[in-house]
Amino acid sequence: MALLIRKLSSALSFMVGLILILSWFYWADSPILLLFSGLVLLILGIIGVVTTIAKEEEELE
């Protein structure tokens, strides 16, 4: 159950990060903080997905 919650939170973080980056790109007078927060969430989402996959593989062995 914990891995499922980690997967969902990582996917949500990844998705929100992409939305923030695209919002920064298409919004005319967007603050640079929007881009940085999107990048941080995107990287956290990627790291979360990779570590969750690694933990899931360890449990299968």
Image (cartoon, grey):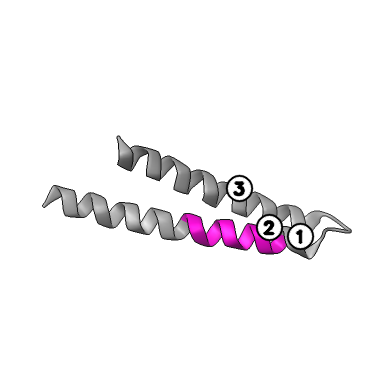
Instruction: Give the spatial CA distance, label 2 vs label 3.
Output: 9 Å
Query: Given the current orientation, which residue lies at the most extreme top position?
Result: 1
> How many discs appear?
3
Task: Give the residue type at disc 1.
Answer: Phe
Task: Give the residue type at disc 2.
Answer: Ile
Discs 1, 2 touching: Cβ within 8 Å: yes
Q: Which mark is residue 61?
A: none
Q: Report the mark closest to the observer, 1 or 3.
A: 3
Q: 10 Å neighbourhood of mark 2: few (<14), some, or many (≥20)?
A: many
Query: Residue at the spot x=30%, y=34% of the render?
Result: 1
Q: Return the residue at label 2.
A: 21
State left or right for residue 55 relative to residue 60: right
Query: Residue at the spot x=46%, y=43% of the render?
Result: 9
Chain-order first, disc 2 or disc 3 = 3
Query: Residue at the spot x=74%, y=52% of the render?
Result: 23
Is 41 in the magenta? yes
Instruction: Give the spatial CA distance, label 1 vs label 3.
Output: 14 Å
Viewer-nearest residue: 42 or 26: 42
- Segment tinted magenta in the rendering: 35-45
Discs 1, 3 touching: Cβ within 8 Å: no
Q: Position of residue 57 (x, y in %)?
A: 21, 53
Query: Given the current orientation, which residue lies at the most extreme left position?
Result: 61
Q: Where is residue 36 in the image (x, y as percent from the top left)?
A: 68, 64
Q: Residue 16 carries which label?
A: 3
Task: Give the residue type at disc 3.
Answer: Val
Q: Return the residue at label 1.
A: 25
